[in-house]
Image: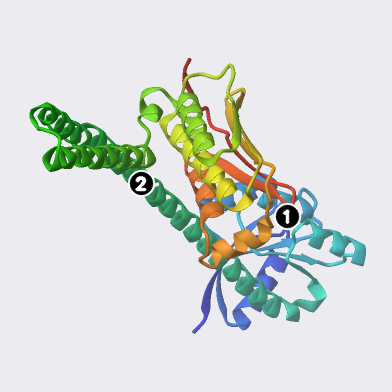
Amino acid sequence: MAVPLRVLIVEDKEDDAALLVRELAQGGYAPAHQRVDTARAMELALTAQPWDLVIADYAMPSFSGTAALELLTASGLDIPFIVVSGAIGEETAVAAMKAGAHDYLMKSALGRLVPAVRRELQDAEVRRSKRASEQALREANLRLRALSSRVLEIQETERRQLARELHDEIGQALTAVKINLQALLPHLRAGAGAQRIEDSIEIVDDVLAQARNLSLKLRPAQLDDLGLPAALRWYLDRQARIAGVAIHFDSDGLPARFRPDIETACFRIAQEAVTNALRHGRPGEISVRLACEGPVVHLYVRDNGAGFDVGRARNKAIDGGSLGLLSMEERATLAGGRAEFRSTPGNGAEVHAWFDEPARVAR
């Protein structure tokens, strides 16, 4: 059975066009064709219906194969384009191929037409399949990014709720227990009973401290109440006291608030970078800087510790090891930004995250 083929023939001579159609029919195709010989006619034909193939004469009185190729390229359509000519030099043929023609042949050698058409149609199908696969991959990545963003959003919401419940409900309940225990002490004589009350008060104090620390780790209230610069300053001061390491923070002249997703991303990236530096780098000092250049917000975390091999760390993360680098990259990407890492063994490390979308909310 003949294979249907929609052919646009750019040719000024009806007889030559008929020869092309006959050659295609003899080669197993059922060509449905239209002949054009001007730029305007070709423009109209390209927009009127889809085409499987364009065959163009190289030289015509009021049009040319080169002009036809330029017109097809400008349309953005990916259609096999074959140049056919009565006389064409090698240099001209090479120039046509470089310009985007898929093949060329002489009118005296039309026996090559069908094999050339068959090959170019197959190649066009491969290109279409590749584009479809790439589009499907892009759409899948967009869906995955949206899902990841939603997961992080839900995670942060749950962290916020748990942190407030620990602070408000459990913290208040434990504080009430402590007050009641303290009220009992004056009514007890020194002895085993009083000692047990004092021991219980110490236990309540320990649990209160643990609940407070857990609440802060889940999500510090400063981030929601005071904004990113204040939350980072509080967090870094706290880490400096706990670790005994000098941590410097600079955010002079910045607005108090940024977009919520950027605030969360910056805080978590800084948290991850500082934790990694303290855990693996053994630094003498760490510097954190938050800066704005126009609408773009930048976060820099630098340390003078042991450093690491970025490529090896990334491969380890991909293989299922520590996910710190990938986590920071993902958080930055989901907030409309990027993150990059600079480090070599023995020379400290730097994490740089920036967000190209407008980040400011209010001063």
Residue hosting label 1 = 345
Residue type at mark 1: give it. Pro
Q: Which of marks 1 and 2 is nearer the N terminus?
A: 2
Q: Position of residue 104 (x, y in %)?
A: 78, 68
Q: Which of 300/208 is in front?
A: 208
Q: Which of 349/118 is in front?
A: 349
Give the answer, above or below, for where 146 lies relative to 222.
Answer: below
Within 10 Å of the Cα at label 1, are there few (<14), some (14-19), or many (20+) other Cα atoms?
Answer: few
Q: Is 145 left or right of 209, judged from the image as shown?
A: right
Which residue is rendered at x = 56% and y = 44% of the image?
273
Q: Residue 150 carries which label?
A: 2
Which residue is rendered at x = 40% and y = 51% of the image?
148
Colour scheme of the rendered structure: rainbow
Residue type at mark 2: give it. Arg
Q: Which of 293/263 is in front?
A: 263
Q: Where is residue 20 in the image (x, y as percent from the top left)?
A: 68, 72
Spatial separation of the CA atoms under disc 1 and disc 2: 36 Å
Q: Which of marks 1 and 2 is in front?
A: 1
Q: Position of residue 127 (x, y in %)?
A: 60, 66
